[in-house]
C-alpha cells in the first residue's frame, strides 16, 4: 500500500438511485416507499424552466414532511451556469429539514465548481446552525468534467460519489448514440474472415472508457462510483446488461429513471449468495493459512493470497450492509 491513505466517504448503500422530478410531488410518496437505496428529487433537467420555483418549494416541503424511511435523500440542484442554482442551494439549506443527506451537483466541470458549492454550503450551514453536514454527489457528464475528473473527485471532503451522466456526456462529446446509456451497433469489431469466408460483428461497450475512468477517480478518492441512466425502461434485459458491465468495472450502483429499474439495479448490484459463501470460505481458508504461517494457499484448485482477503472482505461487508438495511 502507498503511505498515502485513502479516506473513505461515509458508507451508504447506493445500489439503486431513483430519480424523481421535483415538479411531480404526487410521485414522492411512492418513491419513499420504493426499494431504492437513494432517492434524488430533481430540480434540474426533469423540470421545465417555468416550473423551477414551484418544484423547489415542493422539494423543500417533501424533505421534511415525507417519511423517507432508511433511504438516503438527495436533491439535484441546477447547474452552476444557471441563475437557478444559487436559489436552490440557499433555499434548500435555509429551509429544508435536516433529513436531507446530499445534494447532487450536475455537469461539474472543474474542481473550482465543487469548491464554490462547498463554500456556499459551509456559509449557510454555519449561519443557520445546521447540525448535519450535507454531502455531495457529483455528476460527470461533460468532456470538461471528464478531463478534470481526478481534481474534481479530490476537491471537497463533502464528496461522496461520482456519477456517470451518460446522456449529457454523449451530447457534450458529440457521441453517436441511439438510446440513453445503450449500445451502438457501429461501435463494433468486424472479425477477419474464417476459412469459410464468414465474418462476425462483435458489439463493444462505447461507454467503457468513461465508466472505467470514473471508477478509478472515485476509488482513488474513497468515493462511490455510480453508473447513470438507462433510457429504455421497457427493456429490462438491456438495463441489466448495462448494470452488470458497470458492476464488473467497480461501480456499486446505477440510476433508476423509472421505478421498474429499482429492483433490477438492486439485484445486479448485490453480491449473490454464492459469491458471499465463496468469500467467507476464502476468509476461513486464509485464517487457517495465517495460523500455519503461509501467505498463499489453494482453494478449489485456485491460488488465493492476501489480495483475495481484501476482495472477500469487501464482498462480505457489502452483504452485511444490505442485510442490515433490509432489517430496518
Ligand atoms: C444525467 O444527468 C445524464 O445526463 O445522463
Ligand atoms: Mg444530465
Image (spheres, rainbow, N blue to C red):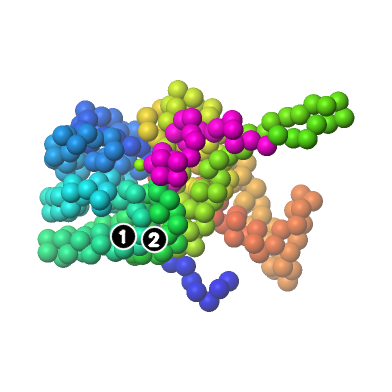
Question: N-terminal of the two: label 1 or label 2?
Answer: 1
Q: Position of residue 172 (x, y in %)?
A: 41, 44
Residue drawn at point x = 48 percent, y = 59 percent: 217
How many numbered marks, from 0 up?
2
Quick one: quadrant of the C terminus?
top left
The answer to whether one can see residue 220 in this image is yes
Q: Position of residue 295 (x, y in %)?
A: 72, 68
Residue 114's tag is: 1
Reading the image, the residue beneath label 2 is 152
Residue farthest to the top? 234
Magenta residues span 162-189
Q: Secondary structure at mark 1?
A: helix
Tell me if residue 19 comes above or below residue 85 in the rendering.
above
Q: Position of residue 89 (x, y in %)?
A: 19, 52
Question: What's the distance in space between the residues labelled 1 and 2, CA to CA?
Answer: 7 Å
Residue drawn at point x = 48 percent, y = 30 percent: 178
Amino acid at each position: 500500500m502507498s503511505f498515502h491513505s485513502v479516506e473513505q466517504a461515509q458508507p451508504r448503500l447506493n445500489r439503486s438511485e431513483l430519480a424523481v422530478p421535483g415538479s411531480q410531488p404526487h410521485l414522492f410518496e411512492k418513491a419513499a416507499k420504493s426499494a431504492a437505496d437513494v432517492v434524488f428529487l430533481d430540480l434540474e433537467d426533469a423540470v421545465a424552466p417555468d416550473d423551477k420555483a414551484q418544484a423547489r418549494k415542493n422539494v423543500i416541503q417533501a424533505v421534511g414532511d415525507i417519511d423517507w424511511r432508511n433511504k438516503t435523500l438527495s436533491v439535484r440542484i441546477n447547474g452552476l451556469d444557471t441563475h437557478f442554482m444559487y436559489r436552490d442551494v440557499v433555499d434548500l439549506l435555509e429551509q429544508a429539514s435536516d433529513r436531507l443527506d446530499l445534494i447532487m451537483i450536475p455537469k461539474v466541470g472543474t474542481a473550482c465548481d465543487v469548491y464554490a458549492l462547498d463554500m456556499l454550503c459551509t456559509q449557510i450551514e454555519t449561519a443557520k446552525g445546521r447540525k448535519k453536514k450535507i454531502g455531495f454527489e457529483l455528476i460527470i457528464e461533460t468532456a470538461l468534467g471528464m478531463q478534470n475528473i481526478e481534481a474534481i473527485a479530490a476537491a471537497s471532503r463533502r464528496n461522496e460519489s461520482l456519477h456517470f451522466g451518460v446522456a449529457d456526456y454523449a451530447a457534450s462529446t458529440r457521441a453517436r448514440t441511439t438510446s440513453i446509456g445503450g449500445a451502438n451497433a457501429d461501435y463494433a469489431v468486424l472479425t477477419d474472415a474464417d476459412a469459410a469466408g464468414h465474418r462476425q460483428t462483435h458489439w463493444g461497450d462505447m461507454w467503457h472508457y468513461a465508466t472505467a475512468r470514473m471508477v478509478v477517480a472515485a476509488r482513488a478518492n474513497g468515493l462511490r462510483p455510480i453508473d447513470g441512466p438507462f433510457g429504455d425502461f421497457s427493456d429490462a434485459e438491456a438495463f441489466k446488461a448495462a448494470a452488470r458491465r458497470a458492476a464488473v468495472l467497480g461501480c456499486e450502483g446505477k440510476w433508476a429513471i423509472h421505478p421498474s429499474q429499482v429492483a433490477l439495479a438492486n439485484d445486479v448490484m448485490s453480491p449473490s449468495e454464492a459469491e458471499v459463501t465463496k468469500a467467507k470460505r476464502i476468509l476461513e481458508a486464509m485464517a487457517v493459512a495465517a495460523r500455519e504461517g503461509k501467505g498463499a494457499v489453494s482453494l478449489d484448485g485456485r491460488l488465493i493470497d492476501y489480495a483475495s482477503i481484501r476482495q472477500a472482505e469487501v464482498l462480505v461487508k457489502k452483504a452485511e450492509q444490505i442485510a442490515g438495511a433490509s432489517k430496518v
